[in-house]
Amino acid sequence: MTDALDLDHLKQWIGRSERASDVVTAQLTKGLRATLFLDIGTPAIGDAAPFTVHWCLAQPVAAMAALGPDGHPARGGFLPPVPLPRRMWAGGELQFLDALRVGDEVTRSSSIADVTLKHGSSGPLCFVAVEHVISTARGVAVRERQDIVYRDMASAAPAAKPAAPPPAATHRVTHVADPVLLFRYSALTFNGHRIHYDRDYVTKVEGYPGLVFHGPLQAALLVNFSASLHGGAAPQNFSYRGVQPLFDGGQFSVNANATETGLELWTANAAGAPTMKASASW
């Protein structure tokens, strides 16, 4: 598979751009609030939506015949056609400049910023960095960089790391990684990736021990937790990276400690091992 990965060819996608638009609705706001363990309320025009609602907006829509075996749209188009079958979010950075509100027409301008190749214990890893600018009639609301990682299917799925002693957290909340939670988030983001809802596929084809918790869902919970510890204000800057998969079937925690510039945050599995790490500053 490494021989088929022509980095020079893939780098030709750098600078490629696209635009998409959508509207923040009250129903979407209610569904996302419920999924993020927030008060559902009765959102009305002008009310703020959850901070990461833009991940639910203007998602690509492909015909069923245009989907790959993993449930994602077939390769090509805006994203470079990386010839590695597994695709996941590795992390990213967010700048929150303005709230997205019910009734807003939102435009997302996206561009491919970089394509890089690394080699890990499981084989070649191809990282695609995508930059997004999320705007409303009031101006820019969110600036974002997403890091997408592609890796080979031939190697075994990474085994869960041995549980480390849980970090000491000043602030912590726990939830259950329920399959319905994962299904709801997939529905809200129009995400057909089978690893989040198809147990036969994720265990028998990709070799994971259970349904994989969405990286963006973990990041969204961390953003909301950081805001709850800072008077309800979204962080001006938020960066996050996945450190190991989180699976369904048990409790997980959302954790935070204060730093000189804001908060360090992480999600952790039932054994206390971090699965995503983040930092927030204001």
Image (cartoon, grey):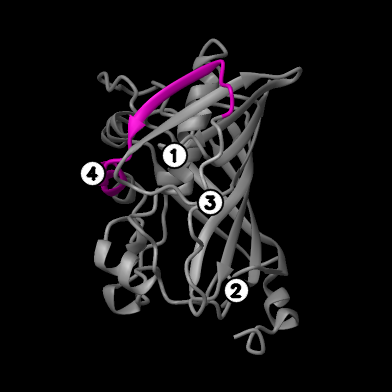
Residue type (three-letter) at the residue carrying disc 4: Val
The answer to which image quadrant residue 238 occupies is top right
Q: In which quadrant will I find the N terminus?
A: bottom right
Q: Say if mark 2 contacts mark 4, CB within 8 Å.
A: no
Query: Circle 1 is placed at which residue position?
Result: 269
Q: Position of residue 210 (x, y in %)?
A: 33, 56
**Residue 91 is one of the magenta-drawn residues:** no
Residue for point 47% across, 29% down: 254
Label drawn at residue 180: 4
Report the span colored magenta.
167-184
Residue, far top = 231
Category of crowding for the residue at label 4, using alpha-carbon neighbours closer than 10 angstroms: few (below 14), some (14–19), many (at least 20):
few
Q: Which of marks 2 and 4 is nearer the N terminus?
A: 2
Residue type (three-letter) at the residue carrying disc 3: Lys
In three-dimensional space, the C-alpha distance between marks 3 and 4, rounded to whole angstroms, equals 25 Å
The mark closer to the camera, 2 or 4, is: 4
Q: Say if mark 3 contacts mark 4, CB within 8 Å.
A: no
Q: Which of 25 and 236 is in front in this view?
A: 236
In three-dimensional space, the C-alpha distance between marks 1 and 4, rounded to whole angstroms, equals 17 Å
Residue type (three-letter) at the residue carrying disc 2: Pro
Q: Nearer the viewer, residue 260 or 57?
A: 260
Query: Circle 3 is placed at which residue position?
Result: 161
Q: What element carries label 4?
A: helix
